Image (spheres, grey):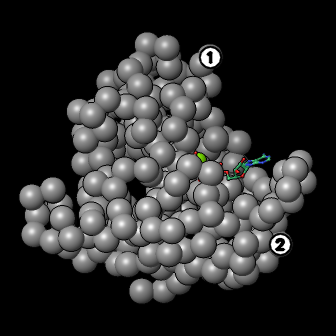
Amino acid sequence: MSTILEIKDLHKSFSDNPDGTEVLSSLDLEVEKNEFLCILGHSGCGKTTLLRCIAGFESFTGQVILNGSAVTSPSPDRIMVFQTFEQLFPWKTVFGNVDFPLKQTGHKDKAERKRVVEDALKKVRLSEYAHYYPHQLSGGMKQRVAIARALALKPKLILMDEPFAALDAMTRRELQNELLLLSQTEDCTILFVTHNIQEAIILGTRNIVLHKGGKIVYDKRNDMEKPISPSSEGFGRIWQEMRDAIYME
Ligand SMILES: Nc1ncnc2c1ncn2[C@@H]1O[C@H](COP(=O)(O)OP(=O)(O)OP(=O)(O)O)[C@@H](O)[C@H]1O
Ligand SMILES: [Mg+2]
């Protein structure tokens, strides 16, 4: 295992914050290649801000180092997947939505792009919907397109901010299963924010809990054999540990 992401002494505050307190205050974190890191914590503790700093969308002090290079701006090697269903271009088809960022990032060969897009859509089981527009898709299908778009770019990191939070329970479970399989077969490292402890245990190879200020109060590998379900041995203990960590003062 090798370290892909190093965060050292990360500080982040917003200038329009009236009390001037830091959202992230001296956060240190190392992430291994191919890790599936789930990040939990109360609303407002800085989870989205952390992902946005890693994505290069925010200015900060301290260091975010990806594969040895300092993050200073956004790049296709770090792709974010959001909670909202409205993260696709409404005027582009499913194919077009996955193709566009590839084109924008210098993939000039159209035939090669077609192959990559088709391959990504196949992975999320949307091959038959390539010509559909976003308004013709369900929420779950839209999130699959967003995942396909990320996979097609072959990023070093996929940053997922509560991607399944707006889905109904059944679709959420389906997408969890699909993402779990993808994470085991694709060469990718995933940072996944969720409020759902069960989701974190099922998906994560490591789970962390943040408190206010981005303070890491829980950080454990999850070595339970996958697939994991609430009836798996050890599930209840980890669930309780994480719940205690979230609610501890
Ligand atoms: N652009 C911004 N300008 C000013 N303050 C911000 C901005 N973005 C976030 N904040 C503040 O930073 C803190 C952390 O926000 P963040 O969105 O990272 O929380 P979160 O952990 O993702 O919460 P949630 O679980 O509700 O999504 C909050 O107090 C929020 O008000
Ligand atoms: Mg958030």
**Front position in the image: 122 or 64:** 64
Is residue 224 among what the camera can see?
yes
* As drawn, 121 above or below 58: above
The reply to whether the residue tagged 2 has its Cβ within 8 angstroms of ligand 1 is: no
* As drawn, 59 above or below 2: above
Give the side of residue 176 with respect to residue 16, left or right. Answer: left
**Front position in the image: 157 or 95:** 157
Q: Position of residue 102 (x, y in %)?
A: 61, 44
- Residue appearing at x 15%, y 71% in the figure: 234
Q: Position of residue 79 (x, y in %)?
A: 59, 52
Q: Amino acid at mark 2?
A: Thr
Assess disc 2: are there few (<14), some (14-19) or many (≥20) residues with their C-alpha within 10 Å of its C-alpha.
some
Is residue 127 among what the camera can see?
no
- Residue appearing at x 78%, y 64% in the figure: 22
Residue 226 found in image quarter: bottom left
Q: Earlier in the sequence, mark 1 or mark 2?
A: 2
Q: Tag on residue 61?
A: 2
Q: Position of residue 141 (x, y in %)?
A: 38, 28
- Residue appearing at x 47%, y 79% in the figure: 32
How far apart in space, not on screen, are marks 1 and 2 (Cα)?
Answer: 38 Å
Q: Which residue is mark 1?
A: 91
Q: Secondary structure at mark 1?
A: loop
Q: Position of residue 213 (x, y in %)?
A: 67, 66
Q: Amino acid at mark 1?
A: Trp
